[in-house]
Amino acid sequence: MSEEFGPNFITVTDEDGNDIELELLDVLEHNGQTYMAFFPAVLEEDEADEDSDDYGMVILKSITENGEELLSTLDSEEELTEVYDLFMEMLFQDEDEE
């Protein structure tokens, strides 16, 4: 993914109504589905606690509901594991090319 124009940020609302700002890491197509990997956006003064449960890769998928594109959690642990592994392969492949 090109960072030519800088990182992309989105704000999503969780099931409790809390807004969460995420930085888009990468996008992939797999089995006809679009998946997006994000990291929680952290302000420098907040310094992320990398051991926190709130820190880490967030994977969402793009779905269309009533003609509107939405982001959704994955349906199963198996789907999450498979897509996570694909994103990790992509990330390490990008590092090897540098």
Image (cartoon, helix red, strand yellow):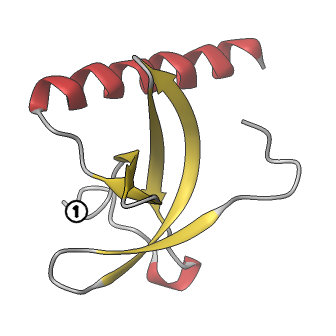
Name the side, left or right, on which 15 lies relative to 71. Answer: left
Question: 78 or 88, which is in the foreground?
Answer: 78
- State the image coordinates of residue 31 (x, y, percent, origin top left): 39, 17
Give the quadrant of residue 23.
bottom right
Residue at 11% across / 31% down in the picture? 77
Crowd class of label 1 (few under 14; some 14 to 19; many from 20; radius 10 Å)? few
Outermost residue, left direction?
77
User: What residue did someone put label 1 on?
Assistant: 52
Name the side, left or right, on which 87 lies relative to 8. Answer: left
Name the side, left or right, on which 27 lies relative to 53. Answer: right
- State the image coordinates of residue 82 (x, y, percent, origin top left): 27, 19
Residue at 65% across / 21% down in the picture? 95
- State the image coordinates of residue 18 (x, y, percent, origin top left): 27, 85
Q: In the displayed structure, would residue 64 be above or below residue 11?
A: above
The tally of labels here is 1
Question: 95 or 65, which is in the foreground?
Answer: 65
Q: In the displayed structure, would residue 61 be above or below residue 76?
A: below
- State the image coordinates of residue 32 (x, y, percent, origin top left): 44, 22
Q: What is the secondary structure assignment of the residue under circle 1?
A: loop
The amino acid pointed to by label 1 is Ser
Give the quadrant of residue 75.
top left
Residue at 24% across / 74% down in the picture? 14
Outermost residue, right direction?
4
Q: In the displayed structure, would residue 20 be above or below residue 88?
A: below
Question: 31 or 23, which is in the foreground?
Answer: 31
Q: Quadrant of the N terminus?
A: top right
Q: Quadrant of the C terminus?
A: top right
